[in-house]
Image (cartoon, grey):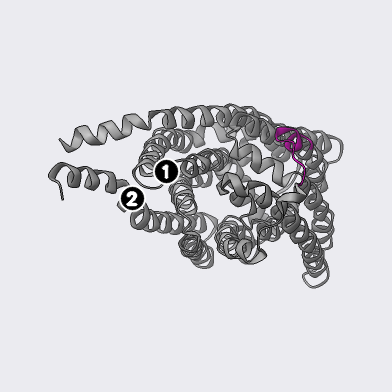
Amino acid sequence: MPLRLIQKAENHIGPHFAQLARGLGSYGSAEVATRIVRLLTTVVIARSLAPEIVGEAALALTVFELVRVLERIGTGQQIVQAKADELAATCNSVQRFYAGWTGALMIVQLLVAALLALAFHRPTAGAMLAVLTLVYPFMAGGHVQFYLAMRAGQVARLARIGACQSIADQILTAALLLLWPNAWSIVLPKLLTAPIWLILARRAAPWRPDRAAGQLPASRMLRYAGPIMLADGMTALRTQGDNLIIAALLGTSALGTYYFAFNAGVGIVSSLVTAFGSVAFPMLCAAKVGAARMGVLRRLVIGGAAVFVPIVALQALAAPLYVPLVFGAHWAFAAPLIAILCLAGLPLLVAQITGCWLRAEGRVGIDAANSTLTCALALGGLWLGAHFGGLMLAVIGLIAGQTAGALWNGARILLPALDLPRRHALRSEFGS
């Protein structure tokens, strides 16, 4: 019977489900530890700084993330996907290409910082952005090693690296805020903790360039890099452009409120979704093209839904209770915003799975188109809400647009792939 054939195929990929569970367990435990510390830091920020001051730091960090998205050119994914006989040459090429690229980004960010300070009369935000350019050399120093560890399936180790840096960031932020209640206390730790990431990444997968292996053609790297950068760029624009729209239409005070609500509502879920992608992508790449990879996709969809639907529902429903209790009664007005923003976790999950599948299949151009569509819908909904209403309507528009884009892309890409094993079983059963 077709059902028995499907069950036999799914039993064959059972270890992949265990791998997903172990990976999410590693990232999940690290995220819980990180989130506890981050929660304490958010409490300190909420009780120490006015929304206007938080908004100044948020503006600098938003622009930084928008510039940094240009760093995401798919070089790491090429290491994960490389064939064994091309791995040394791929690593050589990635190191040289990425170092030059991040050096150019430092210049771009300095120019943007000057523009922010002089043209938009935001000298503090411009100075913060200029200081954050020093993060790029640390990123370049451990880029190859980090993705070699991902290729090797060192999920628990990568989770610890992220947790160590994030916890150090949050502890340092809280300490600086207690000593110096200033927007700089939110921004400086991003730079001061970068060496921690570099040291741990280089220890995760020791590597030296192999001169004898040579280099890959630059054209080959660029063909992959362009669509990846566009896809990640649209994702970053969607997740960071909202801050710019809020600041432009509703002011920095509203931005401070939105920044707080977004981090309190989406922070933990978005981190877990990113962790999910870090586990899912290598699993899909390691599986054979065809039925085996489709089987892994089925497990990822089932596992992702089982984990994230309860988390999102619980966090959204509990927002009116924990917001005033944890962050203070003066933030109780933000509880409805936080509850709505929690719902963003589910479209983020759908988009993550869709993107991982397309990249594993080498269809990076479609991934870029999907990200562009979702970005346009999400920011369009946010702009309409902010223009014709207030912050609440803007948040509703953002979530509605993001959900529409994720569901449309997921239905077009994932449903045919998920249904193919059943169709294959039917063809085998009836000999057609």
The question of residue 354 being in magenta is answered with no
Residue 139, given in percent of the width and then of the height, sits at 75, 48
Evaluate if marks 1 and 2 touch, with contact meaning CB atoms under 8 Å apart: no
- Image height check: is 261 above or below 398? above
**Quadrant in which the N terminus is drawn:** top left
Q: Nearer the viewer, residue 29 or 186?
A: 29
Mark toward the start of the polypeptide (1 vs 2): 1
Instruction: Assign a secondary structure to mark 1.
Output: loop
- Residue at x 66%, y 52% (from the top left corner): 90
In this rendering, does residue 428 appear at all? yes
Percent across and percent down for residue 51 are 70, 50
> Which residue does the image show at 61% across and 41% down from the upper left?
331
Residue drawn at x 72%, y 40% is 45
Q: Amino acid at mark 1?
A: Lys
- Badge 2 marks a residue whose secondary structure is helix
Count numbered badges in the picture. Answer: 2
Identify which amino acid the numbered label 2 is placed on. Answer: Ala
Residue 118 percent across, percent down from the top left: 83, 71
Residue at which label 2 appears:
417
Percent position (x, y) of residue 168? 76, 33
- Please state the extent of the stretch shown in magenta in the rendering: 199-209
For residue 288, which numbered disc appears in the image?
1
Residue 201 on the magenta segment: yes
In the rendered image, the residue lying farthest to the bottom is 119
